[in-house]
């Protein structure tokens, strides 16, 4: 099948991908590289970041990496340090997992706030920062990754599902506002997907009709302009 082409004139020359070290993030970075778009990958673990960076470079694009916990209070400063000299045409906020599941009251307040920072605050902060720059240039795109958990309250992932609901409603309003600046906004509602993060939680989707990370990444990039 034909390699999917993403419009590098509108969404390049650089993409920023929080959650860019594995799973959907890796697939996005490699697909963008094949369209001539460079990537800045942000995630906690240096080793998977470097593995993905090698794949991006092999596909012919430049790559920068930043090992960072996106819930850190200085998150934006750290990201600005590696992106302020770049023209970023695409933000793909793929970070966001429920790192713990279980009853809401059994978790610590730190766990609760961490999930909100990672899944809701991070999306809003980076959409604001990069959106302003894109609006000045009158072009760009923002892809926010949500979850089916955000379509209704889900026991055992109460905070996570609430944060993903925020993502969906936030993206819908942002889509309308930013299209006036020629910026496309897409929120991808991710269902059962085979990712390393799910495997770490002990969730096995092998026989459950789950989709691959590649398929989710491809769908996102194919539909950003819709």
Image (cartoon, rainbow, N blue to C red):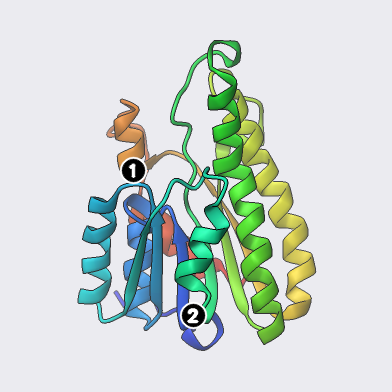
The one nearer the camera, 71 or 5, is 71
Left or right: 109, with 102 as reference point? right
Q: Secondary structure at mark 2?
A: loop
The one nearer the camera, 114 or 206, is 114
Find residue 195 and name its label: 1
- On the rendered image, what quadrant is the C terminus found in? bottom right
Q: Residue at x 20, y 75 (%)?
A: 58
Q: Is residue 3 visible?
A: no
The one nearer the camera, 210 or 152, is 152
Q: Residue at x 65, y 78 (%)?
A: 134
Q: Dots 1 and 2: beta carbons under 8 Å?
A: no
Find residue 75 and name its label: none
Where residue 98 appears, as percent x and y from the top left, is: 48, 32
Where residue 41 appears, as percent x and y from the top left, is: 38, 62
Q: Disc 2 marks which residue? A: 86
Q: Residue at x 35, y 32 (%)?
A: 208
- On the rendered image, what quadrant is the N terminus found in? bottom left
Where residue 219 appears, as percent x and y from the top left, is: 46, 61
Q: Secondary structure at mark 1?
A: loop
Left or right: 35, with 81 as reference point? left
The one nearer the camera, 213 or 114, is 114
Q: Is residue 159 visible?
A: yes
The Cα–Cα distance between marks 1 and 2, rounded to whole angstroms, is 30 Å
Residue 21 sits in which quadrant?
bottom left
């Amino acid at each position: 099948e034909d390699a999917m082409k993403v419009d590098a004139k509108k969404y390049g020359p650089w993409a920023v991908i929080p959650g860019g070290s594995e799973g959907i993030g890796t697939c996005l970075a490699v697909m963008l590289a094949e369209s001539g778009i460079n990537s800045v990958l942000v995630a906690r673990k240096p080793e998977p970041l470097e593995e993905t960076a090698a794949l991006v470079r092999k596909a012919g694009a430049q790559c920068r990496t930043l090992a960072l916990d996106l819930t850190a209070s200085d998150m934006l400063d750290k990201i600005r340090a590696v992106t302020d000299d770049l023209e970023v045409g695409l933000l793909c906020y793929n970070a966001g997992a429920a790192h713990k599941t279980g009853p809401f009251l059994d978790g610590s307040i730190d766990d609760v706030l961490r999930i909100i920072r990672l899944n809701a605050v991070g999306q809003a902060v980076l959409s604001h920062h990069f959106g302003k720059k894109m609006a000045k240039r009158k072009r760009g795109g923002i892809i926010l990754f949500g979850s089916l958990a955000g379509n209704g309250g889900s026991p055992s992932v109460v905070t996570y599902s609430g944060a993903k609901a925020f993502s969906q409603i936030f993206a819908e309003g942002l889509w309308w506002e930013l299209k006036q600046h020629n910026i496309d906004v897409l929120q991808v509602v991710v269902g059962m997907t085979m990712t390393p993060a799910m495997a770490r939680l002990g969730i096995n989707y092998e026989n459950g009709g789950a989709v691959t990370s590649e398929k989710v990444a491809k769908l996102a990039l194919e539909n950003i302009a819709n």
